[in-house]
Amino acid sequence: MLNGMYTNDVTKTERDRFVSELKLFVNRRLFDKHIISEDMYIAAKELLMKRAD
C-alpha cells in the first residue's frame, strides 16, 4: 500500500512539474510573439517557479 501511495505522489509531482514547464513554454511563446509584455512574462515565470517548488 505504501509503495502505491509513493508512486501516486511521484506521478502527481511529475505531472505538476510538466504543467509548470508547459505554462512557462506557452508564456515564452507569447512573449516571443510580442503578445505579452516582458513584465507579464517575468511575473508569470516567478509565480510558476514558486508554485513548482
Image (spheres, grey):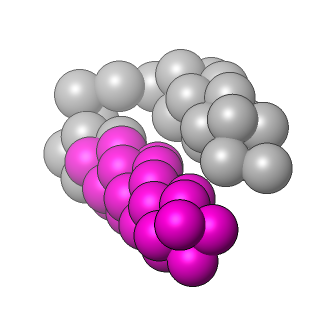
Q: Residue 7: x, y in percent? A: 49, 73
Q: Answer whether residue 27 is magenta in the image.
A: no
Q: Residue at x 61, y 38 (%)?
A: 48
SS majority, magenta: helix
31 sits to left or right of 13: left
Q: How many marks?
A: 0
Boundaries of the magenta span: 1-26
Q: Nearer the viewer, residue 29 or 51?
A: 51
Tell me which corner region of the image, top left, top right, bottom left or bottom right, holds residue 9: bottom right
The answer to which image quadrant residue 8 occupies is: bottom left
Q: Which x, y percent locates residue 23?
A: 36, 45
Q: Nearer the viewer, residue 33 or 43?
A: 43
Q: Residue at x 79, y 50 (%)?
A: 53
Vertical comparison of 16 with 30: above or below = below
Residue that appears at 35% across and 25% down: 36
Kindly identify the residue that appears in the image at 26 percent across and 48 percent down.
Answer: 26
Q: Is residue 17 above or below residue 16?
A: below
Q: Is residue 42 visible?
A: no
Q: Residue 41 at x, y = what percent?
A: 52, 34
- Asked whether residue 16 is drawn in magenta, I would say yes
Side of 36 where 21 appears, left or right: right
Q: Nearer the viewer, residue 11 or 16?
A: 11
**Can residue 26 be seen by looking at this rendering?**
yes
